[in-house]
Image (spheres, coloured by chain):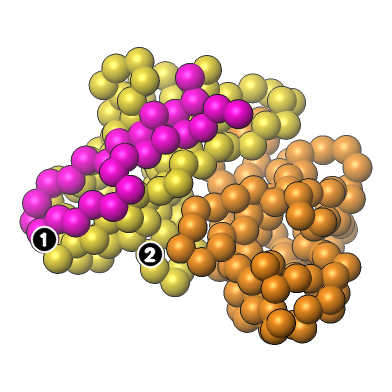
Amino acid sequence: AQSVSQHNHHVILSEAASLELGCNYSYGGTVNLFWYVQYPGQHLQLLLKYFSGDPLVKGIKGFEAEFIKSKFSFNLRKPSVQWSDTAEYFCAASTGYSSASKIIFGSGTRLSIRP
Amino acid sequence: EPEVTQTPSHQVTQMGQEVILRCVPISNHLYFYWYRQILGQKVEFLVSFYNNEISEKSEIFDDQFSVERPDGSNFTLKIRSTKLEDSAMYFCASSDGQLYSNQPQHFGDGTRLSIL
């Protein structure tokens, strides 16, 4: 069955620290990958997406992610976090060559930033 | 930028009552979805809808749930007889579904459903 795994449930960092959140997926074919952020009490916001092409994807707010096909991974990175990055981060995946198929979400990683 | 809009933002309903959640997808999109997020948990797929019929549904989407596109703009999720465990945030999404467009699904702000 298709699945997305996020191994870090809660990450606590100080401001200016570097961030890497892990994400692994299990899909056999063409995969599309996403990172969403959910600030406390708010809706989902797309941080970045990968459909094809350059495996290093840059998103909003200084985030980037790298698609490593051989490792089935799509880790999220940011070189220097800010207090405002405190949120829940969801890795997600879908299959195929369009956005038509359902999105499967990981269980989320809660990021807490100490000021 | 066009948005997916959902109403109401918060719905409070007595257990056993019917509830209808409403969504207006982006106008040129052809694929529509409902997802839900129980408090503190991950977002789960419920159902996808294309060409006026369900294209895929999860095991969560049982006979108590139904979806409809009653006119050219709205997309609704109905829960016939609500249960306490239906309390969640419900997200509507839409996509153009075009091959190689590299456009993601667009999500609405969600409807928080509280069952008393």
Chain with yellow colouring: B
Q: Colour of chain A?
A: orange
Determine if the magenta segment contains residue B10.
yes
Left or right placement of residue B60 versus residue A89 in this view: left
Q: For the residues labelled 2 and 1, say whether their Cβ atoms are less than 8 Å apart.
A: no
Name the mark on residue B68. none
Against A67, residue A108 (above or below) is below
Against A10, residue B71 (above or below) is above
**Residue B103 appears in the picture as rendered:** yes
Q: Residue at x 75, y 70 (%)?
A: A82
Q: Chain of mark 2?
A: B
Tell me residue A23's x, y (percent).
Answer: 72, 65
Q: Amino acid at mark 1?
A: Met
Q: Chain of mark 1?
A: B
> Residue tagged by mark 2?
B38
> Residue tagged by mark 1?
B15
